[in-house]
Image: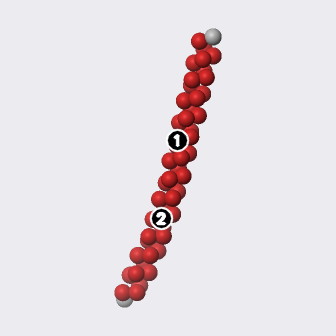
Amino acid sequence: MAAVKKKGKLQSAFAQFGYEHKKLESHLVKIRKNTEELIKMMGSIDKNKR
């Protein structure tokens, strides 16, 4: 019976780990997108100064 409970705890730990990293990946995608937009904006400002 203890092995079954341990397996359940392990599965829930892996599920939580996967959820947290999925959430982290979502945040990183947003940061990458914002960085690309910032690079484009800075490039257009640089072109306007010339």
Q: State how many labels appear.
A: 2
Q: Residue 28: x percent and y percent?
A: 49, 54
Element on which disc 1 rests? helix
| Numbered label attached to residue 1 | none
Residue 24 point in image, percent of width and height: 50, 47
Task: Name, please, the residue furthest toward the bottom.
Answer: 50
Rendering colour mode: secondary structure
Decide: marks 2, 1 in contact (CB < 8 A)? no
Residue 39 lies, in percent from the top left, at 44, 71
| Mark 2 burial class by Cα count in 10 Å: few <14, some 14-19, many 20+ | few
Residue depicted at x 44% and y 76% = 41
Instruction: Please name the residue shown 55% across and 35% down the image.
Output: 16
Where does label 1 land, which residue? Answer: 20
Task: Please identify the quarter of the rendering in which residue 14 is found.
Answer: top right
Where the C terminus falls, by quadrant?
bottom left
Quadrant in the picture for residue 11: top right
Residue bearing mark 2:
34
Measuring 52% from the left and 57% from the top, which residue is drawn there? Answer: 29
**Quarter in which the N terminus is drawn:** top right
Residue 34 higher or lower than 6, as above or below: below
For numbered disc 2, what is the local secondary structure? helix
Q: Earlier in the sequence, mark 2 or mark 1?
A: 1
Count neighbours of disc 1 (C-alpha within 10 A) and say few if under 14, some if 14 to 19, many if 20 or more: few
* Residue 8 on image: x %, y %: 61, 23
User: Marks 2 and 1, how far apart in space?
Assistant: 21 Å
